[in-house]
Each structure stands twice: as structure tokens, then as C-alpha cells.
Image: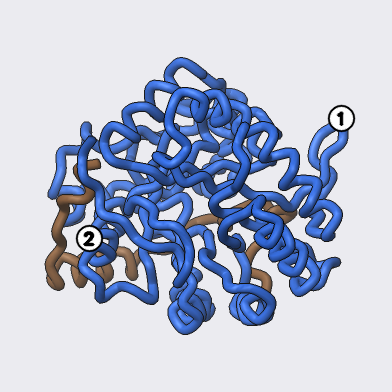
Chain colours: A brown, B blue
Amino acid sequence: MGALDVKLTATDLQEIQARFAQMEVVGDRYAPDMMALVNHA
Amino acid sequence: MNFMPKCQLGSNGPFVSALGLGCMGMSFAYGPADEAESLRVLRRYLELGGNFLDTAEIYGPYTNEELLGRFLREVSRDSVIIATKFGFRFSPDGIRGVDSSPENVRRACDASLKRLGIATIDLFYQHRVDPKVPIEDTVGAMAGLVSAGKVRALGLSEAGPETLRRAAKIHPIAALQSEYSLWSRDVETNGVLATCRELGITFVPYSPLGRGFLTGVIQKLEDLDARDWRRTDPRFGEKALPANLRLAHAVKSSPARKARPPHNWPSPGFLPRAMTSSPSLARSECAISRRTWAHLT
């Protein structure tokens, strides 16, 4: 619950954004049968 | 009772604590259940000021709602907001696919009410869009449950922008629950967040810690119980998991992680949910939620 006390600055958020933008996630969110059920138009 | 900031679901929905408690892992998908431990977690969550409990018919199936039903007998009804979900067909052999037909909507609602031991579900989600049933038919049936006093507010899960628009024309949609974390950011670019903001639908992100992976406590497949569903998750696969570890390492060294010691982070089996109320981000209480979200991811 202490997460509620965390304060991130704009610089912090930019750093997080930059760090993760460089990384590719390997694998889909779900196996194909379950992927078919998400993000419907 | 501790203070926790609250956000309203949609424009007319209930007020829920900024951190919800996703209860799925207490009964389903993440290894063996431990009811005594689950009840301790539920009690502690309420002590800390939380009020938003999330379950679904499919979790078990049924056993997670039954667990919450037992818990609800020991607390006052108005101390908690109960969200549950429908949308699947079951047989004695297991799950038989999606089903959001009006008949199944009504059946599921009555069955969930009975298992939970309550008169009204605070937030009733369609768990997954059923491509065989027009969303207008499904939401129409859900709206009938609101009229009947069995449901207070409506939600969808993993629906896209067009589905949201069509649904909202039938009845106000208070919440959309979809996956959102630093390794699942589709909703930022596929129009989902923008549509929620436009329509005044609260976005409730699930798996904000990547099903526990982004905490860094899962370093190899053997860290998961043999019955843990995540063993079938493509991102936890034999080749994917080692490659994805760099994401967990990046979280560990991020500014968000530095803000609190790692040992104080929630355990992956009982992840609290972060919430951002997209139409209300300017409001102070929801700004706190936004920070929470940033921290949790």
C-alpha cells in the first residue's frame, strides 16, 4: 500500500519511458486461443 | 481504518479505492490455493483502507467467488465494492468457450449473486467480447440487470474502441478492465485509452506487474508451481523468460523501484491492482492513482 506514497518526477517518467522503449518483449500476452479473445475492435 | 484515495468508476459508478485487490490468484491460475492466507490478505487489505475486490465466475471456476462469499459474511456489505465477470460457458469437463448471450448473462448474474451471498453486484463485467453475440444484445441484457436491482454498474474487459462505443450507446459503461503494464502497453496505441477518456469510462488495468514477472521474483520457470498457469504463458516460455528478464531488471533499477525497498512490494500471488481514471486524471485523488500506477509498473 506504500505504493500510494510514491511520487515520480517528469524526469523519472522520461527515464522509465526511454529505458523500456529500447527493450523488445519476447512472446505474446497469451497463447493463441486466448489472444483471439482480446483487443476486439 | 487507514485512508486510501478513492476514484469513481465512470460518471455514475461506485467510488473505489485507488488500489484494488485482484483475487484471481487466491483460487485460480497461480498455483495451489491457501484459503487461510487468502482471508488474511483480504482482511488486511480492508484494514489498510482498500474496498475494491475483483473476482470472476471463471476463477476456479466458481471457487474464487465462493471464497469471497465466505469473506463477505464477516464484513459489512457497504465496506466493499464487489466486481465480478461473466462471459464463459462451462460443462463438467471445464470451460466450453465464450458466451455472452443474454440468457447466459442472466444465468451468470444469478449464480454469482448466490455464490457471493449478496443482493447486488457493484460492477458486472463482460469478461471477454463474444464475437458471435452483438455487444448491443449483451449490454442490453446487462442493463436489464441494473433495472432489476441485481447490478449497480457495468463494465467490459479487453474490448476495443468500436465495441466500447457501441456498448456505451446502450447503457453507460463505468469501467473497462484490460491488461496494462510496462510489458503490455497496447492500450496506449490501439485507441483504447483514448476512447475511455472520450467516453468517460474508467480504465482499470489488470496484471500491472506483468503477472508477477516484473517484480523480479520469477527468475526461471522452476520458480512457478507445477500447476501454475503462467507456465503456458508465451512470455514465460523456455526461451522467452530468460530474454524477458532484462525487463524485470530494468524495473528493479528504475526510479519507481528506488522509491521503495523491493521486499515491500506485493507478492505476485496477490497483486493489488492500480487504477487510473482516465477522464478524471486532473483530480487530485486520481493523480495519486497515476503515481501508484507508475510505481506498480
Q: Is residue A19 visible?
A: no
To which quarter of the image does residue B65 belong?
Answer: top right
Residue B67's place in the image compared with B22, above or below, is above
Q: Type of residue at label 2?
A: Ile
Residue at the top extreme? B36
Nearer the N terminus, badge 2 or badge 1? 1
Residue displayed at 77% across by 63% down: B141
Q: Quadrant of residue B31?
A: top right
- Residue B31's label in the rendered image is none
Which residue is the site of mark 1? B92
Residue B170 placement, left or right of A11: right
Query: Which chain does the residue under circle 2 lie in?
Result: B
Residue in view at x 28 percent, y 32 percent: B47
Secondary structure, mark 1, is loop
Q: Which residue is mark 2?
A: B288
Residue B18 visible at all: yes
Dividing the picture into quadrants, the one containing residue B153 is: bottom right
In the rendering, at what x and y percent does residue B120 appear?
A: 60, 46
The residue that appears at 46% across and 81% down in the rendered structure is: B194
Q: Residue at x 43, y 41 (%)?
A: B78
Q: Is residue B229 above or below residue B239?
A: above
How crowded pointer 2 is (Cα within 10 Å; few <14, some 14-19, many 20+) is rated as many
* Residue type, mark 1 in image: Pro
Q: Nearer the viewer, residue A17 or B74?
A: B74
**Camera-side residue: B13 or B215?**
B13
Q: Position of residue B100 (x, y in %)?
A: 79, 58
User: B230 or B117, which lies in front?
Assistant: B117
How far apart are the alpha carbons under marks 2 and 1?
Answer: 45 Å
For disc 1, the chain is: B
- Nearer to us of marks 2 and 1 is 2
Q: Nearer the viewer, residue A24 or B27?
A: B27
